[in-house]
Structure formats: C-alpha cells, structure tokens
Image: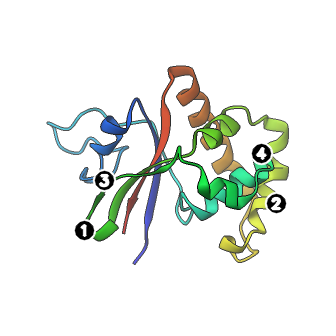
Amino acid sequence: MAVLFDYFVAASDEVAATVVDRIGGPGSSAHPAAPAAFSTVRAPGVDPVVAMGNLERLLTGRSFEDILDDPTSGAIAARDGGERAVLRLRSSLTTALAELEDARIASVALLWSHTREFWGRGDPVALATLLRTLASLGREAREEGNAIYCWVCS
C-alpha cells in the first residue's frame, strides 16, 4: 500500500489539524461543506521526517540529529494509529525553502537524489521540479506568516 504525502500551508496547527479526516487530503474540497482547499504539493515517497530532514540538511548544513531534535516540528493530529496524520514541518526548513534560489535547485536536487531514502536512484529532474514547487510553498508560507504541514495517509 502506498503512503500519500501532501505538503500544504496553513495559518495554525488548529487549522492544519482539520484536514486529518479530509477525504482527498488538504488540496481537496470534495464535500460541499468542506472548507476551501489548501495550497498543496503532492510528494509521493517524500516523507516529512527523513526525506525532508535530509533536504533540510542539504539546504542549511545543520546536522540530521539537530534537525530531528528541533521542537518546531511534529505531529499535531493523528487517526487510526497514525495511518492518517498531520505534521508541522520545522520552521527552519520553511525558511530554507522560501530562500532557495533557482540557481541552486538543480544541484540540491542532484545531491538529494543520491540520499539513502531514494536508494541512490532518485530522479534529479523530478526532484528539481518538486523543489521548485516546495520553494514556492515556502515563500507563500513566509509571506503570509504561516507554516508548512504534511498530511500523511496510508
């Protein structure tokens, strides 16, 4: 069974937590009574802890251990033993994404593609495309004073 990872911007933990039960995730407003869809980036296979932690390590130079110990991230909502969850990304990662220059995207994507979670065979072109959309999400979050979250559904 595949695990879905949707990254989105929300104004607060409370607002972000409302999507934990949303059919289709944060980018969906499938039900007429559902609130409007959130700006969302779907990232198959890119989990918010290890894959995004390694991305942050590449962007900021922080050690992976420091990243994991960062108190600005973590689960804010979960259901069914964690099969559905919403996690807040580290504020340092949101800042790094917002400040990512287009000129660095290809080189960061190439390095990221060789990390263990992609088994050294990640597609650097696809990861560069993903990085561009995540950087845009980071800029949106920063401009609005919001945070980036990840909806996880397995």
Relative height, residue 93 to residue 99 (above, below): below
Mark 3 against mark 4, which lies toward the viewer? 4
Residue density around tag 2, few if under 14, some if 14–19, many if 20 or more, within 10 Å: some
Mark found first going from the N terminus, 1 or 4: 4
Mark found first going from the N terminus, 1 or 2: 1
Task: State left or right for residue 145 relative to residue 92.
Answer: left
Separation of disc 1 and disc 2 at Cα? 35 Å
Residue under numbered circle 4: 60
Q: Quadrant of residue 32?
A: top left
Task: State left or right for residue 40 relative to residue 25.
Answer: right
Separation of disc 3 and disc 1 at Cα? 16 Å
Label 2 sits on a secondary structure element that is helix
Mark found first going from the N terminus, 3 or 4: 3
Residue 80: which disc? 1
Residue under numbered circle 2: 111
Relative height, residue 88 to residue 81 (above, below): above
Are the residues at dot 4 and dot 2 in contact (C-beta closer than 8 Å)? no
